[in-house]
């Protein structure tokens, strides 16, 4: 798992280098945003393993992360297009905040823990 994370970090760094030295800023940003969303999906899948924890709070976190991964996979293209349309700078903290905001406004407000409905 750590190897995959390091591999993604290297790819994102390479994407940033291409964005800085490349000519097509919009396309470079699009590539960066797609890679960032892929990394976030991988992180959420890793955290979704907490669903089998003995702690109720960690199980809840695991279910939330699984829901977030599903949301990101389903809406990846729309999220990328929205970030490009907003002319968002390709910075990790901005992408994280945007994705968290979109998830919380779209899904998390309607999300309930399994068995609580």
Image (cartoon, helix red, strand yellow):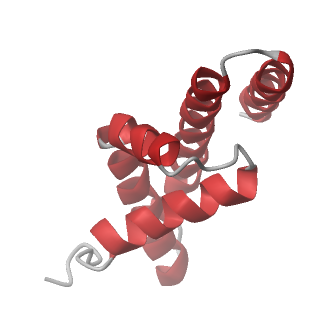
* 7 vs 60, nearest the viewer: 7
Residue 13 relative to residue 42: left or right: right
x and y, in percent, of residue 116 in the image: 20, 84
> Is residue 67 placed above or below 14 in the rendered structure?
below
Residue 76 relative to residue 47: left or right: left
* 42 vs 2, nearest the viewer: 42
Q: Is residue 61 visible?
A: yes
**Residue found at x 50% / y 52%:** 86
Q: Is residue 64 visible?
A: no
Q: Quadrant of residue 3?
A: top right
Total labels drawn: 0
Residue 105 relative to residue 15: left or right: left
> Is residue 10 placed above or below 52 in the rendered structure?
above
Residue that sits furthest to the left in the current view:
117
Q: Quadrant of the C terminus?
A: bottom left
Residue 38 relative to residue 109: left or right: right
x and y, in percent, of residue 49 in the image: 52, 53
x and y, in percent, of residue 90 in the image: 70, 43
x and y, in percent, of residue 19 in the image: 76, 25
**Residue found at x 69% / y 48%:** 89
> Is residue 116 placed above or below 76 in the rendered structure?
below
Q: Quadrant of the N terminus?
A: top right
* 54 vs 8, nearest the viewer: 8
* 117 vs 10, nearest the viewer: 10
**Residue found at x 35% / y 58%:** 67
> Is residue 25 placed above or below 94 in the rendered structure?
above
Q: Quadrant of residue 7?
A: top right
């Amino acid at each position: 798992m750590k190897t995959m994370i390091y591999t993604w970090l290297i790819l994102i760094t390479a994407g940033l280098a291409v964005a800085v030295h490349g000519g097509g800023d919009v396309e470079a940003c699009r590539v960066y945003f797609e890679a960032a969303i892929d990394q976030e999906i991988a992180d959420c899948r890793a955290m979704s393993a907490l669903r089998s924890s003995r702690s109720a709070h960690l199980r809840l976190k695991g279910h939330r992360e699984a829901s977030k991964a599903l949301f990101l996979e389903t809406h990846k293209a729309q999220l990328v297009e929205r970030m490009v349309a907003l002319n968002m700078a390709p910075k990790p903290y901005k992408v994280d905040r945007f994705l968290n905001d979109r998830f919380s406004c779209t899904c998390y407000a309607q999300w309930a823990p399994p068995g609580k409905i």
